[in-house]
Image (cartoon, rainbow, N blue to C red):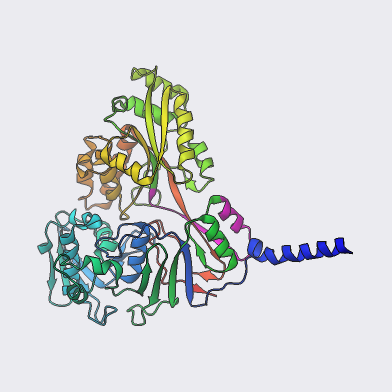
């Protein structure tokens, strides 16, 4: 009897645990509240003129509005605060007509003077994301309010509409409330950057109620939003760093959405009633960079030998199929993507290239990589792959900040890095990877190639067909001659409870719209 009672009690305990472990406990969050488990530790500022991290720009997009917006497939510009616009014949000057009756959360009107003030403020502050505007607008005086309902922006080059939208839909181009900025300005902070960093000066669908660093962001629906009040009355972004903590919180019903689980955890939830897993490609690349300033990598043959030595299929297995394998610098689903994948593991070809370069005996090189899972495993596999062509790799597993320090300082031999598009146009990738003069990735890897002239030409090409051809030419040159072995386009995966609707990941990392979110 006692043995039977013990078994019964054990069964009861197991059954009590099953809802959390298998099917999920009932949700503990109210029907009009969305709770997201993620890491918010990268948030430095919520000032649109400064926010440049994935989570901070995501929050900014829900607090603020921009003149224009993108269609879901990023193929065309749509009205935002501007209802319409006209362009000059040379595509250098755009005039925007503003939507009437829009108000900031403070109650102040959103007018042409506010737009002028906001864009000029970004240029005056000159913080991290300012280049998205200053690369294309020469002077703050080129942004002019025309009356109260029109704004004229004069660019320093021809701007096809998709490129114009890439700049003016970006969070850095958000419109802030000038009255609040001026009221909170200080002698050492005339643009009130410190105040806007932690406070709300927007007109967007949500009002910032609080941001507690490394803990929580709370947003509240704006009742008077010009598109109508969002379905979710409140959104919480809860700081949960560990994937295991996110999974448990989702299963217990403490959160509605988990943003950063491990591949095996996503697979577990895909087969569990009560949960949904969604995935989409992202405008992000993972790649191995080779510093041309380190003598062996000055040889194109050596660089391409590395590309042929890598086992791309093995890397995909390490990622547990949470990547698309790609090799060109413009990711899949972006305009002008080149789908070529010429490099497969081919040791015979790799060794022949090493002989052509006079490097058959090999050499030693360091490979810097961050601690982010699974990058150390990727580095270990690349070390093994390159040993087969006599390149002896010393892997350095470092803090992300230290890897970035080496990379920006151009002291690396090789580095495993990530690059995400700042705006959904191939210009952003081409400049970074192929234009040495832009002082981004080509500069870091000391690769100064004539292809940079095509980059400068392509960004100003108004004809869409010709523009696409130019960007494909750039990608082909970088693929064949560049110092990068692109090996992955990471997929964005999110898990949620099945009663959550309208939460759909976007290729632009975390910057996807939550205003359509609801619960059944």
Q: Quadrant of residue 75?
A: bottom left
Q: Nearer the viewer, residue 151 or 413?
A: 413
The C terminus lies in quadrant: bottom right
Q: Nearer the viewer, residue 8 or 137?
A: 8
- When the figure is inspected, residue 167 is found, relative to residue 186, above or below; the finding is above
Total numbered labels: 0
Which stretch did the figure color magenta? 264-284
**Residue at the limit of the structure toward the right, as seen here:** 1
**Residue at the limit of the structure toward the left, as seen here:** 141
The image position of residue 427, as x and y in percent, is 27, 49
The image position of residue 412, as x and y in percent, is 32, 34
Magenta-span inclusion, residue 271? yes
The image position of residue 375, as x and y in percent, is 45, 42
User: Is residue 305 in view from this perspective?
Assistant: yes
- When the figure is inspected, residue 325 is found, relative to residue 244, above or below; the finding is above
At 32% from the left and 66% from the top, the residue drawn is: 60
Magenta-span inclusion, residue 130? no
- When the figure is inspected, residue 339 is found, relative to residue 50, above or below; the finding is above
């Amino acid at each position: 009897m006692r043995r039977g009672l013990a078994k019964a009690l054990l069964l009861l305990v197991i059954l009590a645990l099953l809802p959390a472990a298998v099917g999920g406990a009932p949700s503990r969050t109210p029907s009009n509240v969305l709770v997201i488990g993620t890491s918010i530790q990268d948030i430095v500022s919520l000032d649109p003129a400064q926010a440049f991290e994935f989570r901070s720009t995501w929050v900014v997009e829900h607090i603020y509005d921009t003149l224009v917006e993108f269609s879901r497939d990023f193929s065309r510009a749509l009205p935002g605060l501007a209802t319409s616009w006209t362009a000059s014949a040379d595509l250098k000057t755009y005039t925007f007509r503003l939507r009437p009756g829009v108000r900031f959360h403070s109650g102040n009107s959103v007018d042409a003077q506010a737009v002028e003030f906001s864009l000029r403020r970004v240029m005056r502050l000159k913080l991290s994301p300012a280049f998205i505007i200053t690369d294309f607008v020469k002077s703050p005086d080129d942004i002019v309010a025309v009356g109260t309902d029109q704004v004229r922006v004069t660019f320093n080059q021809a701007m096809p509409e998709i490129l114009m939208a890439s700049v003016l839909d970006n969070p850095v181009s958000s419109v802030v409330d000038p009255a609040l900025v001026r009221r909170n300005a200080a002698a050492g902070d005339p643009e009130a950057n410190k105040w806007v960093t932690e406070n709300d000066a927007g007109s967007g669908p949500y009002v910032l109620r609080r941001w507690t660093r490394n803990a929580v962001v709370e947003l509240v629906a704006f009742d008077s939003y010009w598109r109508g009040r969002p379905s979710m009355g409140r959104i919480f972004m809860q700081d949960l760093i560990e994937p295991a903590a996110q999974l448990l919180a989702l299963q217990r019903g403490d959160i509605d959405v988990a943003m950063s689980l491990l591949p095996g955890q996503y697979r577990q939830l895909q087969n569990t009633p009560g949960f949904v897993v969604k995935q989409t490609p992202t405008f992000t690349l993972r790649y191995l960079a080779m510093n041309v300033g380190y003598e062996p990598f000055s040889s194109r043959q050596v660089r391409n030998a590395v590309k042929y030595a890598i086992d791309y299929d093995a890397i995909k297995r390490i990622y547990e199929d949470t990547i698309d394998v790609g090799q060109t610098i413009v990711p899949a689903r972006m305009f002008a993507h080149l789908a070529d994948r010429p490099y497969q593991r081919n040791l015979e070809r790799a060794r022949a290239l090493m002989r052509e370069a006079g490097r058959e005996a090999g050499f030693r090189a360091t490979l810097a990589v961050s601690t982010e899972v699974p990058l150390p495993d990727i580095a270990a596999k690349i070390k093994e792959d390159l040993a087969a062509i006599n390149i002896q790799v010393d892997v350095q597993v470092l803090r992300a900040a230290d890897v970035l320090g080496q990379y920006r300082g151009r002291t690396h031999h090789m580095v495993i890095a990530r690059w995400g598009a700042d705006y959904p146009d191939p210009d952003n990738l081409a400049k970074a990877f192929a234009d040495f003069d832009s002082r981004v990735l080509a500069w870091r890897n000391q690769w100064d190639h004539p292809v940079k002239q095509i980059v400068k030409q392509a960004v100003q090409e108004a004809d869409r067909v010709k523009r696409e051809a130019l960007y494909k030419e750039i990608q082909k040159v970088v693929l064949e001659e560049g110092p990068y072995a692109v090996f992955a386009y990471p997929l964005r995966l999110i898990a949620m409870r099945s009663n959550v609707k309208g939460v759909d990941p976007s290729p632009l990392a975390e910057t996807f719209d939550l205003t359509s979110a609801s619960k059944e």
